Image: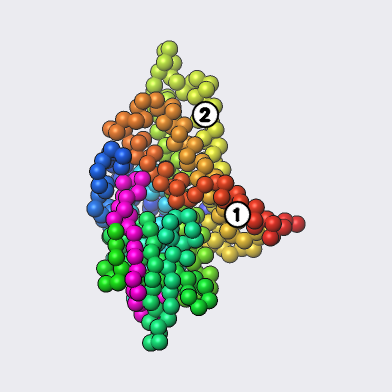
Amino acid sequence: MDFTFSEEQQAALEAAKAVFARVAPDGVPSPALASGAVADDFDRALWARLADADLLSLLLDTEYGGAGLDPIALCMVLRESAKVLARVPLLESTAAAAAVQAYGSPELKEELLTRAGRGEQVLTVAAHGRTGHDPAELAVVARRDTDGTWVLDGMHTAVPWAYNADAVLLPAHTDYSGRTVLALVPRGHEDVVTAEQFSTTGERLAELRLESARLAPRYVLDAEGAWEWLRLLLTTGTCALALGLGEAVLGMTSEYTGKREQFGHPVATFQAVAVQAADRYIDLRAMEATLWQAAWRIGSGAAGALPASGDVAVAKIWASEGVRRVVQTAQHLHGGFGADVDYPLHRYHAWAKHLELSLGPAAAHEETLGDLLATHPLR
């Protein structure tokens, strides 16, 4: 089998490297050291450059101005974005547009996708539900009114970019069958109340309360499997972010320990330091291998002994544990320098913690994987 990336995927990667090469991680103090949000908006200039490089339309078909690529290409770009802590809704907007393409009505596709691919329509996703622990699809109830309009009641918390995106795609369960639908709620909807929250990265999040919010039928994706597919794509993209961040942090650690001297020798030459760095390198390679497996399964729909959710669970196990271990080791090997707010490691630490919390604990994913193995025995 040929495991090399395609020419189109490599082209997307090179374009991403060129765009993100102009981005330097900001020196804003971590949320614990600063009041309020890091910024009121995401990096609009970077967003425009991503649009110019056709990196916002990777998953869209050519009829909508896209490249027609797969989740692997998106994860390659996300990996590069995390190395510089790029403050853009790249994962959320791309994933939401891809879900509309796969499950939306022809009218909604025509209205939304071309503009989303050009960066003119910014989308985000509410994926954490009411508490961040319960299934997100249970946080909102959707019902059909007598005139066909959808009516939504409930709450989603920790919604990223909600104050800046043009619309939020959120899951909801129907009151008549429990089936999950995806609803596209425009920003500023008169029946949606927004409350400000903050992430561990210092970015603005939002709590969205829907109070009998009415939506036209074309803005609701009522298709079997739509939320599950979107959830797996978002999770795999988050694993890609964790990988890119971890690689950047290990690079910083390698550079620092190669220059920092004790007893007349670089500390990188000390066995205890070298072994810790080697362990973290192994973590990153495991994160990478499981990421590509998960992205390939989602994009190809290839059959396997387990559903694609099994591969995603394995990627989550490595990503949530791996990114934590990489950053903890970096802080340890940097010594007091790692706590210096003039040095960017503290920002990577905050982002890593946010990604770890978003992915959830490895033990929960191991339990999910165990349940899948119990119901899909390997032969």
At horizontal 49% and vertical 49% (from top left) the residue drawn is 360
In the image: residue 48, left or right of residue 228? left
292 lies above or below 342: below
Q: Label 2 sits on what residue type? A: Gln
Q: Which residues are magenta?
A: 196-221
Residue 116, image x and y in percent? Answer: 34, 67
The total number of labels drawn is 2
User: Which quadrant of the rendered structure holds the C terminus?
Assistant: bottom right
Residue 368: assigned label: 1
User: Which quadrant of the rendered structure holds the N terminus?
Assistant: bottom right
Give the main secondary structure of the magenta stretch.
strand
The residue to which callout 2 is attached is 276
Examine the rendering and report whether any part of residue 100 can be seen. no
The local secondary structure at tag 2 comes to helix
At horizontal 40% and vertical 27% (from top left) the residue drawn is 334
Query: Which one is in front, 4 or 142?
Result: 142
Residue 282, image x and y in percent? Answer: 55, 37
| Badge 1: residue crowd in 10 Å (few <14, some 14–19, many ≥20) | some
Q: Label 1 sits on what residue type? A: Thr
